[in-house]
Amino acid sequence: MATYIRTYAPGFGLLVAAGVLAVATASLSPLVNALVVAVCIGAVLGNLVDIPEQFEAGIGLRRLFLETGIVLLGVSVALAELLTAGPRLLAIVLGTVAFGLVVVESIGRVVFGLTDELPSLLAAGSSICGVSAVVAIGRVIGARDGPLALAAGTVLFFDAVTLVLFPIVGRALSLSSVEFGVWAGLSMFSTGPVAAAGFAYSPEAGQWATVTKLVRNSLLGLVAIGYSIVAVRLRHTVGTGTKTRATDPSVTRLWRDFPKFLVGFVLLAVVANTGVLTASSIEAIGTVTDWLFVLAFVGLGTTIQLSTMRDAGGTPVAIVLVYLVIIAGVSLVAVMALF
């Protein structure tokens, strides 16, 4: 035990100290996201401070924190709200998520010629549930820390932009509360900014935005399973250097490579929807989840190298910006037609 403490305590202590600073900074203004601050603090440490080697093991716990946080996200999947939201809302959410995944993957790979995991991370983050989807899909496809941090930072940047911009645009267009709520729930990325923008518009808009976003969030497990199956097949391709022909992986192989934390995510979602958990328990789990992601994103920020981001240029931002313009316009037309 003493050995484990000596190994992990320095880095873990650094994550906690930086995480507390991030949360305290974010509490100064509702417009400041703790995860954004956490990534920034981690990036400063990673680029301006020569972190001693004995801190690496503790900072490496970020992966455990990410996976545990993803599992705990299962309590936010509201099956009852999904069922009562109606077929129109469910259909438009399914269409939006599918459309978003295809568009972002296509923009990244066809237009910008990217061949790594970055387009998939950006597609998940912008189409499903922001940073939560980035880290979930990143773990599923075995994404490297560099693209993972770059995608998370890009999504968080647009979270801040859309939180300010969407209510302004909504009022300029004189959208009703229902129209704005569904539109924000379909187009914005992370749950927190969606709810904040919705309730800033009106209480009714906040309710519709939250319900719409929860329906989108509930698709995370399904999309993650899809990416996992594709990733497993690609890892077991045959040929010389190109993904020319996929083998048919056995059930044993699929289970070996399948991210087990997704099982926990699904099981917790089922448990949460049986009514076993009290409201206070769900709130406590939500608090733990928030802190796990804060600690994880401090660690993730330390992996961001400014030289790598300079080499990438504005590509990730350009990809997400093009998608945001497209999805905001398409979803607005659909919402105004259906609601």
Image (tube, rainbow, N blue to C red):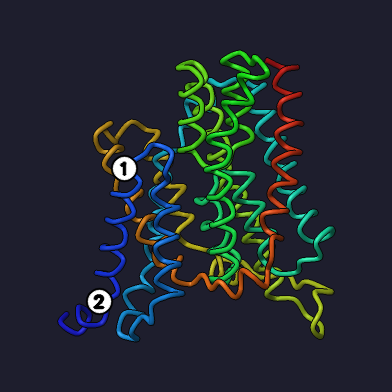
**Is 202 rendered above or below residue 128?**
above
In depth, the one of 254 and 58 nearer the eye is 58
* Residue type, numbered disc 2: Pro
Residue 21 position within the rendered picture, expressed as x and y whole percent measured from the top left: 29, 56
Q: Residue at x 26, y 82 (%)?
A: 7
> Residue lying furthest left in this view?
2
Residue 165 position within the rendered picture, expressed as x and y whole percent measured from the top left: 59, 33
**Is 313 rendered above or below residue 204?**
below
* SS class, disc 1: loop
Residue 185 position within the rendered picture, expressed as x and y whole percent measured from the top left: 58, 31
In depth, the one of 157 and 149 nearer the eye is 157
* SS class, disc 2: helix
Q: Quadrant of the C terminus?
A: top right
* Residue placed under numbered mark 2 in the picture: 10
Of badges 1 and 2, nearer the viewer stands 1
Q: Residue at x 55, y 51 (%)?
A: 133
Residue 335 position within the rendered picture, expressed as x and y whole percent measured from the top left: 70, 21
**Is 5 rendered above or below residue 192?**
below
- Assess disc 1: are there few (<14), some (14-19) or many (≥20) residues with their C-alpha within 10 Å of its C-alpha: few
Left or right: 291 in relation to 336: left
* Residue type, numbered disc 1: Ser
Mark 1 and mark 2: span between their CA atoms? 26 Å
Left or right: 101 in relation to 69: right
Label placed on residue 27 = 1
The image quarter containing residue 286 is top left
Q: Residue at x 69, y 28 (%)?
A: 91
Q: Is residue 63 visible?
A: no
Q: Are marks 1 and 2 in contact (CB under 8 Å)?
A: no
